Amino acid sequence: MNRSKSQPPTLMRKLRTTPLLDLIRGRLSGRLDWRGLIERCDLPEPCRGIVLEVTRRTRLWRHERYEVAGELIAHFGDGLEAGATAETPVERFGDARQTARLIRRAKVRGRSAVYHARVWTGRGLGAVVVGYVLAAVWLSIGEPEPMSVDEIIAKINAPLTSIPDDQRAWPELKAILIAVTAASPETAFTDDRRDELEAQFGTQIPKHLAELTPNNPAWSHAENFTHDHASMIQQLIEVTRHPHLGFHIDFFYRMHTEDYQVITNTPIGDPLYPQPPEDDWESMTTAEKLAKQSTINTPLPHLGWLRRLARILEVEMVVAHQRGESARVLHCLSAISRLGDWASEQPLLISCLVDVSIKKIAIKRLGRLLQHRPDMYVNSDLAYAAHRLASMRISVSEGIDSEFSIWFEDMLDRIYNQDGQLSDEGLEFLFRLDTFLNGEPIDDRNTAPTWFHDKFFEIATSRWSFRLATPLAAVLIADRQALTNQIEKLFLEITDYGDMPLGQMIRSDPDNLIEDMASTTWTGLYYFPIVAYLPAISAAHRTPAGLRSARDALLIAIAAELYRREHNTWPADQQALVPKYLPKAFADESDEHLAPTPPAC
C-alpha cells in the first residue's frame, strides 16, 4: 500500500474551504477541503483516483462531498484490509458516473424540507417565467388592425356625401373668413384693454362687446365694431341662407392648401406658414402611428371659427336692437342658429356640443333683448322668432351615438388585435396617448429632473417594457368583449338618461356607473380604457336639456306677450295659450317628478 504524499494546504486553500461560521469564531479549520482529505488518505493511487472522480461528479455541496469522500475512503480501506490488491476494489466498484449519480440522488433526497420547498418554488417560478415569456411572444405576434386614415375620414364625412353643391356654404364662407382674418375683429376686450378703459371711465367694463349697453361709456366700441365690419357681417348673414356648410373634415396634411390656410387662420400664400407635410410614418413606432392616425387626432378647426362668427353676430344683434332694427335682430338670430346647425353636420359629440353652445348664444341674447324692449317687436316679429326657436334642434343624441359607434370602436380597434386580445402596441398606445398627441409625457417630468428619473422614464416607456408588461396587462385589463359589453350597458343607461326630464337627470347620474368602475384599484385598472378616456356623457345630456328648458320658457313668454297684446291681460296659464299661441303646453323639465319624455329636437 502506497501512502499519499500530499503537500500541506496553502493559506488561500484553507480560507476557501473554511465555513464562514468558523472564520467568525477565529478558526481557520479548512474542514470542507474534501480534495485534501483524499490526498491525505492511505490509499493506493488507483483507489484515490476513483474516489476523487466519483466525489467530483456528484456535484454536491462541499460538506456533502467531504462526507462522500470519507465514506468512499473507508469503503476502499475496508477492502484493502481484507487482503485485496489495489486493482481489485477498483474493478469491483463499477461505473464511476453511475455511482456518482446514485450517490447524488440519495444525498439530495436526504436534504431538509426547506431545501426541497425552495427547489420546487424555483421550478414553479421558472415555469411561470417561461410561460410569461411565451405569452409575451404570442401577444406580440398579432397587431391591431384599425381603420385607415381614408376610412376614418370617409366615416366622419359620410353625412355630407348626399348634399348638393348649391346647398354648401363653405365656398362662399371661405372668402368671408379670409376677410375676417385680415380684419381680425375681436368681440372681447383683452384684460389690459379692460383695465385701461375702467381707469379711463371709472366704471366697470364687461369683457364682451355684446354685454355693453348705451348707458356704458364704452358703448361706442360696440357701435364702431359693427360699423367697421358691416360688409363682412352682411355677407355672413347672407351666406347662412345655405342649409349646409359642407366642410369636409380631414387631417391637416391632406387638406386643400387654401382650405388649410383659411381654417387655421394663416396668411394665404405666405411661405412662412406652409401646410404641414405628411408625417414620416416609417420612422414612427406602431403605437405612435396608432395614435396619430386615430379619430381622436382628427382636427376640427372649423368649430372654433363658427363660435367666433356667432359672437360677431351677437354683437350685431345688440347694436341693431338699440337702433330699433327688429328685422336685423331676427336675421342675426336665424344666422346664429344656422351656424349651430353647420357645426353638427358631422355628428361627433364635440360638434353637437358646439352646436348647442352656439344656439345658447342666440337664445339667451334674444331673451335679454325681448325683456329689455318687447314693444319694439311687432306681432309678426314675435311670431317669426317663435318659429325660429321652435325649429331649433337642440340635442346631442347623434353625437353620443357616434361616440360609441365611431370613436370608441376605433379606439378598441387600436388597443386589441384581430383576436380581441390586448396587443403590446395597443398597450403602449393606451398609456402613452397623451405623449404621442401632444409631445409631452403623461406625468410632469419637471417634477424630478434628475438623471435617475429620466433614465427610469426612458426604460419604463421603452418598446421592450411594454412587450414584457403585456401578458400582465392582459390579465389586469378587460378583453375586448368584456369592455364592449360594459360599454353597451353604459350606452343603454345613457340613452334612458337622455329621455329623462332635466330634474330627473340631475338626480340620477349615469356617470355613477363609470365612478363605480373607478371606485377600486382593481376595477379602475380592469376598465381603464373606459375610465380614462370616456367623456362625462351625463354632462353632455344635461347641457342641451337645460337649453331646451330655457328655449321653451322663452316660447311661453313670447306667446304670453302676444296674448296680452290681443286681450289686454295676461293669460291665467299655458292652457289659455293653446293652440293659438302655443302648439302645446310645455312641462317644466326641472320638476323631478315628471315622467320620462323623449328629448325635444
Image (cartoon, grey):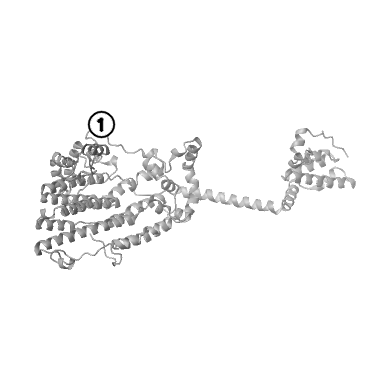
371 w.r.t. 33: above or below: below
Residue 218 drawn at (x, y percent): 18, 41
What secondary structure is found at the residue carrying circle 1? loop
Q: Is residue 317 above or below residue 284?
A: below
Q: Quadrant of residue 527?
A: bottom left
Q: Three-letter amino acid code at disc 1?
A: Pro
Q: Position of residue 361 (x, y in %)?
A: 22, 50
Which residue occupies the foreground of this view, 567 or 251?
567
Residue 498 left/right relative to 39: left
> What is the quadrant of the N terminus in the image?
top right
**Residue sitting at 86 percent across and 45 percent down?**
77
Q: Residues within 10 Å of mark 1 (few under 14, many from 20)?
A: few
Q: Could you tell whether 378 is left or right of 493 in the image?
A: left
Q: Position of residue 339 (x, y in %)?
A: 20, 49
Which residue sits furthest top?
271
**Residue 54 visible in the displayed image:** no
Residue matched to label 1: 271
Dividing the picture into quadrants, the one containing residue 52 is top right
Examine the rendered structure and indicate whether residue 275 appears above or below residue 315.
above
